[in-house]
Image: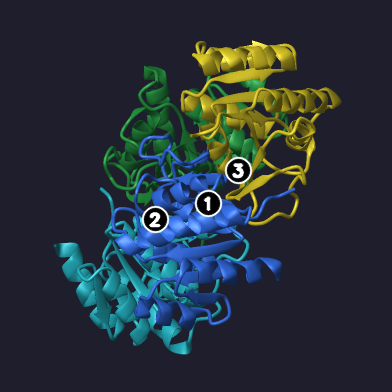
Chain colours: A yellow, B green, C blue, D cyan
Amino acid sequence: MRKIVIGVMGPGTGASETDRHFAYELGKLIAQEGWVLLTGGRNAGVMAAASRGAKAAQGLTVGILPTADASGMADTVDLAIFTDMGSARNNINVLSSDVVIACGMGTGTASEVALALKANKPVVLLSDHQESQRFFTGLSATTVFVAKTPQEAIAITQKLIDY
Amino acid sequence: MRKIVIGVMGPGTGASETDRHFAYELGKLIAQEGWVLLTGGRNAGVMAAASRGAKAAQGLTVGILPTADASGMADTVDLAIFTDMGSARNNINVLSSDVVIACGMGTGTASEVALALKANKPVVLLSDHQESQRFFTGLSATTVFVAKTPQEAIAITQKLIDY
Amino acid sequence: MRKIVIGVMGPGTGASETDRHFAYELGKLIAQEGWVLLTGGRNAGVMAAASRGAKAAQGLTVGILPTADASGMADTVDLAIFTDMGSARNNINVLSSDVVIACGMGTGTASEVALALKANKPVVLLSDHQESQRFFTGLSATTVFVAKTPQEAIAITQKLIDY
Amino acid sequence: MRKIVIGVMGPGTGASETDRHFAYELGKLIAQEGWVLLTGGRNAGVMAAASRGAKAAQGLTVGILPTADASGMADTVDLAIFTDMGSARNNINVLSSDVVIACGMGTGTASEVALALKANKPVVLLSDHQESQRFFTGLSATTVFVAKTPQEAIAITQKLIDY
């Protein structure tokens, strides 16, 4: 039976210390819920921190890589999907996630949030970035949720999954 | 020799009357400059209006379709590229455009602007939508430009091409 | 740490009874080796049979779906990757597999074998189809292997993995 | 109105002298018919030769590149579509062609022929490679045609288009 998959999207090298800390917590909490963690799989920023957190709690981690092989991959990825599609793989990230949590913001993350909303996939924004919140809730009032902490993001995700 | 390609991205069925009017003007002006017009190719909103404008000025129109065949395609598309990739084709749209002009805003358009910025492709926002301007110029101050009219968007594009 | 992933590719509705029987055995043997089974994920032919075999041996099954959601998916897929890319997802199937086993033959399977060889990925042909063997060993003598039984295919795979 | 697009697929660096000669002739004949030539766009083998032939007859050439930019592109490509998708772009090549002509054979070309047959797209094999002919006509007797010369390939294509 298909496992529940939660995507954590966020900046790579541009991630802030808070982004990485929150990503680690998200990964850990997702694993503790028994969900699978899906990230972009690269060895940088939010992707690497979330996968590390999930492994700390014995979770299963999936990485959807932009590359054709494992160069630049986080070593905490259990299951690597190699797309060789660059940023076009962002659409696979969101389609394959039951809920998308955006942890921090950047151009790649913005594309993932927008693609998720386009596909009617619920998105939790974990960020105090006011412009992101205004922009994305303006685009889709009913499928964007805002959280201030990883714990709050997981509580919202839990409700979205149950629903 | 490779022709200059200008992408016009914008909402389909969600396009406003202004969006469609501006898209038609953009298509016409792009054709008059001797550039190729690239759109998402569907028979709706900004895509259809821009292609119609370009054909009114004897331009060449390319449509990058999300589908595997011509169902739902604008009949003013000269050259159809069938991707069968849904929204993942948005990345091809922006990579194949020398400059991306966003005419109006929506979830699909937002993904295209974000993917363009991710790929370091210049974007002209033709919209009085304040939240979009704030959000995207916040993401990438140096590659986002704001225009109030199609004429202004083309003037900016001309400078970006010359540069 | 990244798990070993073995792809089993083969016809959907066009699969023969032998193809399905061999696919079930392959899935079971792959799971018994502790490897992850990767298929195209649809509820048909070789994909469904291989996944059923792997679950019978408590393995982990990944499905790389051509669709945007779970309609038409085999219910023995644990981890669903939704690509919405139609047959272009065949390239992801082979890039994400450490070894590709082709069980039976058809147009989709032929594309997967060819894409695997293009990417220098080893392929085991489990088929008594002489024309396939001649064609593909002619294309790439050093990376195509022929097996007559699922057990032989797994023995070859084991050597390729160890190497 | 959508232009007729004929895809010429064949080896890059692995192309034989005959492959390149035939590809040049195909490109020229396609342009003389008023059709658009579509290739994989790279500056190598059949792709480059076909585009050169089409330009010699003032045709329009489209290249569907595996890359994100113009590095490695044939300079006889008029319209470049940058996919950044590696070999997954092969599916776009065949979906966007009204008829696919395979000029020579290799792993990439084999994937294109197989993907074309999967999509019910007619394929003309221009090759004296017996194993290819047997394999692909065996896969799909009604949509594979064999030609011995570029002129014969174009005659078959003309009938397929008219039909």
Q: Is residue D42 visible?
A: no
Secondary structure at badge 2 equals helix
| Badge 3 vs badge 1, beta-carbon distance below 8 Å | no
Q: Looking at the image, is B69 positioned above or below residue B86? A: below
Pointers 1 and 2 within a single chain: yes
Instruction: Specify the quadrant of the image occupied by residue B70.
Output: top left
Instruction: Return the residue at label 3.
Output: A87
Label 1 element class:
strand
Dot 2 falls on which chain? C
Q: Chain letter of disc 3?
A: A
Pointer 2 local density, CA inside 10 Å: few below 14, some 14–19, many at least 20 = many
Distance from disc 3 to disc 1, alpha carbons, whole Å, reads 23 Å
Say the numbered circle drawn on residue D120.
Answer: none
Residue A15 spot, x, y in % from top left: 79, 31
Q: Amino acid at mark 2?
A: Val
- Residue B27 point in image, percent of width and height: 41, 37
Residue under the image location 55 percent in, 66 percent down: C154
Chain holding disc 1: C
Residue farthest toward the right in the current orientation of the protein:
A17
Q: Is residue B17 above or below residue A34?
A: above
Residue linked to disc 1: C38
Image: C33 above or below D128: above
The residue lying at 32 percent from left, 42 percent from top is B55
Q: Which residue is tagged 2?
A: C46
Residue B159 position in % (x across, y down): 62, 40
